[in-house]
Each structure stands twice: as C-alpha cells, then as structure tokens.
Amino acid sequence: MVLTSKRLHTLLSGLTSCERGSGSEKGFTLLEVMIAVAVLAIALTSLFGSQSASVRLATESRFYIQAPLLARKQLAELTLTEEFISSEGDFEDDFAGFRWELQVEEVFFEESEILEKLDQQFWHLTMIVRWGEDDFFTYQLETYRQNVSDEE
C-alpha cells in the first residue's frame, strides 16, 4: 500500500474527525501541526549539520594549503644563516594565528664509513607550523641540511 498525500490526509482526517465537529470548521489539527514541526526539525537538523561540516572542512583546507607554504618559506629564510639554531615565532599580521617552531638536531653517521669521513656537519631540521586554539592544527616539515663552511 503506497501512502500518498491524499491517503495520508484521509487517514489523518479520520483520526481527528471528532475534533473537527461538523466539518465546516477550517484549519489544522494538533496532530497535523506536530507532524509538520517534526518533519521541519529533522530537515533543519540535517541542514545545520551539513553546514557545520562544510565550515570545518573549509577551515581545515585553509590550514593545509597555507601551512606547507609557510613552513617552506620560514625554513628557507632560517637556513640562509650560517648556523642552524632551534627557535620559534609567529608570522605576524600577514598570517595571524599561525606560529612556527624550528627544532634542530645534529646528525652523526656512525654506521657509514663514507659519510663518517665527511668534514661537514649534517643537521636534521624540523619545522612545525601551528594554528588554532590550543594548536588544534599542526603541520610538520622535516629535512636534512649541511653546513657549508667558507673555508676551502
């Protein structure tokens, strides 16, 4: 049995016929209003849920597009110096809320005889970009660099 709007109306009017009196009164019954409100509530709940998911995804996309570019930019600026030093800071007004941190570790090649003979230092650099309340979003870029000495 397919429930069409005409059958639903007939069914509901049969259930509520005692409330309508002689049939000359026009308007909606309490049951009809309650069903309409329930359908509207379900529709609005799903609409607001999808809207909030859309805003969250747009925010994540913004971070994951900007963070790698900011990490590379900041790492390039910091590696122009002669020494690698762990440091941290922010991107000022251009990218408000974004913060960066550089972690530097010296790398030793004890297992490789060839690399052990190199007279240059190698560094493991980790650039971390954070954004959001309580650093909700975090991006990490790792690379290895060597100090090139001017003494040759």
Image: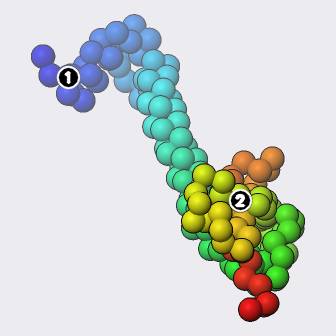
* Amino acid found under the numbered disc labelled 2: Val
**52 or 105: nearer the eye?**
105
Secondary structure under tag 2 reads strand
Residue 10 quadrant: top left
* Amino acid found under the numbered disc labelled 1: Leu
Residue 142 quadrant: bottom right
**Quick check: 32 above or below 110?**
above
First-in-chain label (1 vs 2): 1
**55 or 66: nearer the eye?**
66
**Quick check: 114 above or below 25?**
below
Q: Give the residue at mark 2.
A: 107
**40 or 93: nearer the eye?**
93
Circle 2 crowding by C-alpha within 10 Å: few under 14, some 14–19, many from 20: some
Residue 96 percent across, percent down from the top left: 80, 70
The mark found on residue 12 in the picture is: none
Q: Give the residue at mark 1.
A: 3
Residue 117 percent across, percent down from the top left: 65, 68
Secondary structure under tag 1 reads loop
Residue at 78% across / 77% down in the picture? 78
Name the quarter where the C terminus is drawn.
bottom right
**104 or 136: nearer the eye?**
104
Residue at 59% across / 60% down in the picture? 113
| Residue 94 showing in the rendered view | no
How many numbered callouts? 2
